[in-house]
Amino acid sequence: MSTRIVVLGGGTGGTLTANRLQRHFKHEDVSITVVDQDDHHVYQPGLLFVPFGLAHPEDIVRSRGRHLAKGVVLIERPIDHVDLERDTVVLEGDHELPYDVLVVATGARLLPEETEGLTGEGWDRRVFTFYDLAGAVGLAEALDSFDGGTVVVNVVDLPIKCPVAPLEFCFLADWWFTERGIRDRVRIVYATPLDAAFTKPVAAATLADLLAEKGIELVTEFNTGEVVVDEAAGVRKLVGYDGREIEFDLAVVVPLHGGAEYVGRSPGLGDELDFVRTDPSTLQTASKPNVFAIGDAANLPTSKAGSVTHFEGEVLVDNVIAFLEGRPLGSSYDGHANCFIETGFSKALLIDFNNETEPLPGHFPGPIGLPLLEESRLNHLGKLMFQWFYWHSLLPGRDIPGIGPDMPTRGKRRATVHA
C-alpha cells in the first residue's frame, strides 16, 4: 500500500516541504498531498512594500499549484479538524484524508478582534495593518492622502510573523514622508511590548540608535489593551494596560497572532493560542510521532520568519524520511534565522542568529559576504533579490551552497553593548 504524506498548508513551509519530499520519494510508492483553502500564494515579505507603492498585489500573489512539484496533489478545501487517533484529516463537507505522516504548515492568523476596539470605528479608516493583503492595500490609500500628524506603529503582543517588519515600516515611513517633503509635519512613534527595540541586546542597541537618528520615537513595554476611535469627539488613541495613552492620526497595528482555527478543533494538537506543540530540535510534534510541524504554525521559541521556515525545511524532511524508514531522528535545528531589515533610502541591515547566539557584527555567510548589523546598499539589493530567490530557490526546496540550516559562525565577531 502507498505511503501517504499529507501537508496542511500551501504557504512557504508546506510548499518547500512537499517539494523536498517529492524529490526524495519520486521513484517510490509515496503520495504527497497538500491541502489549502485556496490557490493564492502570497509572498508575505512583499506586504511591507505595498503601502509605499513599492509593490503591488499582482507582484506578490501567485498560484499555489504553480509552485508545487509534478506529482504533488493540491486539494483546495478548508480543514475542519485533525483526528489524531484515526490518523485522518477531516475537511469541510466531511471529506476524509487518511495519512501515514502529517506535516502541519498552516502558519499563523491575525486576531484583531481579540484587542478591544481594534476592529471598531477606526478600522480601515484610521487604523490599519499591513500584515494581510487587504490591509496593506487600504494603508497605501491612507498614506497617499496623509498630509501630517502622528503615525503610531504598534505591536499588540508577541509572537508575530516577521518581528522586524514593524521596525521596517517605521524606517520606510521616514523615507516616504521625506520623499514627499512633509517629514517635518509627521511624528512617527514605534510602540512595542518589548523592553527594547528588539529581542536581542546587540541588535536592539543598533536598531534603537537608528530609530533615534531618524527621529522616530521608541515607546517600550507598551501592552495595548484598547484602541479608542471616536471621530465625533475627535478622539484617537491607543490605551495600554498600565493606563498610558498614545494619541494618533494614523495607527499601523500588528494584531495578536494565533494558529489556524482548525488546530483548536483538533484535540491534542495545539496550545492555548492554537500553535502546534513542537520539539524545537526535531520538529516532531508532542501530539503523535507521525505528526510534524514547520514555520509559523509551530510553537517554537524562534522567530516566525521565512528564513526560519527555510532552514527548518531541510531538518524536517530529513526527520520525516528517518521516521518512515524506522530510524532515529538524526537532524537537529538550532533556531537559525536571518533577516534583511529595510531602513529606507535604498539601504538595509542584515542580522543572522540562532537560539544561542544573538545577532553579531561581521559578514554573512562568511568572512567575505554581506555586512551584518550595518546599513548598506548591498543589503538593500539583497532584500530586493530575495523575492526572486523565494520563488525560484526557496519554494522549490533547493539546497543553497554555503547556506544550510546551521547558523554559520565564520565571519562574525563578538560585540559589546554599551549602556
Image (tube, rainbow, N blue to C red):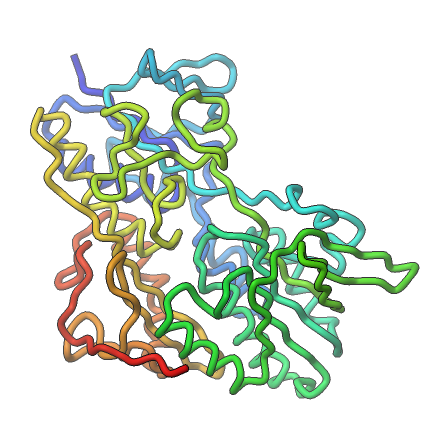
- Snapshot quadrant of residue 292: top left
**Residue 282 location in percent, x, y?**
21, 39
* Towards the viewer: 2 or 353: 353
Of the 4 image quadrants, the one containing the C terminus is bottom left
| Residue appearing at x 10%, y 29% in the figure | 27
Q: Quadrant for the N terminus, please.
A: top left
Give the side of residue 298 with respect to residue 253, left or right: left
Q: Residue at x 25, y 64 (%)?
A: 357
The image shows residue 304 at horizontal and vertical percentages of 39, 51
Residue 352 location in percent, x, y? Answer: 28, 67
Q: How many marks?
A: 0
* Pick the front one: 105 or 73: 105
Q: Nearer the viewer, residue 163 or 88?
A: 163
- 111 to 363, vertically: above or below: above
Q: Is residue 384 visible?
A: no
In this rendering, position of residue 358 left or right of residue 410: right
Question: Please, which residue is most extreme toward the right here?
Answer: 232
Q: Relative to 321, does residue 162 appear above or below in the rendering?
A: below
Say which of 298 and 376 sits in front. Answer: 298
In this rendering, the answer to whether 234 lies above or below 3 is below
Residue at image location 62% in from the left, 58% down from the top: 253
Q: Residue at x 60, y 66 (%)?
A: 191
